[in-house]
Amino acid sequence: MRKAQYSNNWASLDSRPVPPWFQKAKFGIFVHWGPYSVPAYRKPAPGLYASYAEWYYASVMYDSSNGGRDFHTANYGSGFEYRDFGPMFRAELFSPDLWADIFKRSGAGYVVLTAKHHDGYCLWPTKSPCKANWNSMSTGPGKDLVGSLTASVRKAGLKMGLYYSIIEWESNKTHRTKTGYFLPDSIVSKYCIPEEEYIAHMNFQLRELVTEYQPSLIFSDGGEWDYSSDYWKTRDFLAWLYNDSPVKHEVVVNDRFSKDMQGNHGDYYSSEYHDVPGGISGHPWEESRGIGKSYGFNRAESLFDYSTSKELIHELISVVSRGGNFLLNIGPEASGRIPLIMQERLLDTGNWLSVNGEAIYGTTERAVPEQGCLHFTVKPDTLFVIFTKWALTVEADLLANELPEAVSLLGCQCRIQWKLHNRKLMVSLPALTVDEIPCLHAWVLRVDLKHTDNRTEH
């Protein structure tokens, strides 16, 4: 019998090398989609997490302080339960090939779909009896949404990942509320899965998703709020995943399976809307956010709640220059239509990457941090200077072992004048018209390096 390479303990599990594709990809697309996309509502508010429309079940429809209860009652009636949204989640305009094409054009290397969010609704025909009437085959679309999107994404040449909520609001206890549950007692008593049965159900579904769809990435969530890896049996699952699963050589997982795991264990650490104080360094990491203030589609958001293409491209640059991946979320409508403003943001990002992707994909963090509007990434013998404000003169401090041999502007055949003075690279850019400039929002100088060239004037 083959001896397992990784044992059921953190020292062994943490010794597994991170599959290299993840840190090379740099940019991914997150997709939050489910019954919460039907009401698609939460009053935008300042503060972290305050505008998440995908939290409609737990933080809107029973909350009188944010106007959510009044909204729900006025539009759906006081006796209308969240589960009544299930048949209304029809996905009648869902085109997985179109989605995959848009994601490919965005320049992303991977996609992460919410297979199950905290509401417990499953976007695949799970065999868990606990969800016999609460999945996309039995209620709503009548389709395997995970399966169809997975096939299209892979056909487009991208990696496919799945988000899976470890907790469910209807079943799990929490320290976050006075009652000890996320939902009113009347809902919990009606839909709650008993504790031991729930843990078995959750672990069954994780293995089911891996076996049936073979995701390259698992984005866990919610498990880190209240309970340990012993409680969730997380290490048992990871040992199986790394040793015996069909994706054992490729899969990467984040750090939100359990409370003791966050920021300590996992192939990569997760941050959303910059919610990790001081940021993350010294370990693979990923920053996620929506194009607006919400992950799930929020009809209450206006144009001013959405980041511009320029802002999103600048965030991509900042995250990658600090060694992370950027996971940009879209929230499709319940019909399956991706809002046009979200499509535009993705295509704008793709247009920028089509010119400057060399400075993003497969790069690593530089020892010297950002310098104002200057950001840096590196490859062997190549330094990329990314500047987010156009200027005819760009000056960048160089490390002792960085000796320029040639300087070019990505996307432009123009000749670049440069010189080296006191370990500072001084670059003069030509005056370019709007038709000649290679792209919008940010630009990249490629600096080819060598260690023996003494020339300083060009």
Image: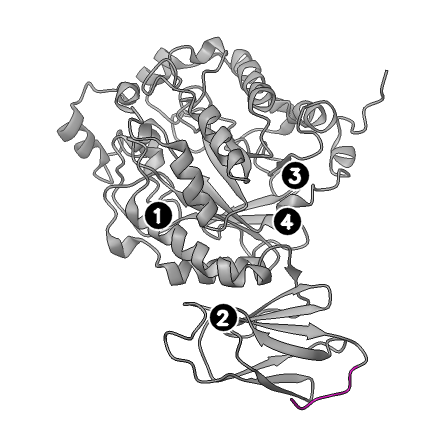
- Which SS class for mark 1? helix
Alpha-carbon distance for marks 3 and 1?
32 Å
Residue nearer the viewer, 8 or 369: 369
- Which SS class for mark 3? loop
- Mark 4 against mark 1, which lies toward the viewer? 1
Mark 4 or 3 closer to N-term?
Answer: 4
Residues rendered magenta in the picture: 453-458
Q: Which numbered tag is attached to residue 266?
A: 3
Residue nearer the viewer, 163 or 358: 358
Q: Pointer 4: residues within 10 angstroms few (<14), some, or many (20+)?
A: many
**Residue 220 shows in the view:** no
Q: Check whether the beta carbons of the residues at disc 2 and disc 4 lie within 8 A of each other.
A: no
Judging by the rendered image, the residue that carries numbered circle 4 is 23
- Mark 3 against mark 1, which lies toward the viewer? 1
In magenta segment, residue 253: no
In magenta segment, residue 454: yes
Q: Quadrant of the C terminus?
A: bottom right
Q: Amino acid at mark 3?
A: Gly
Mark 2 or 1 closer to N-term?
Answer: 1
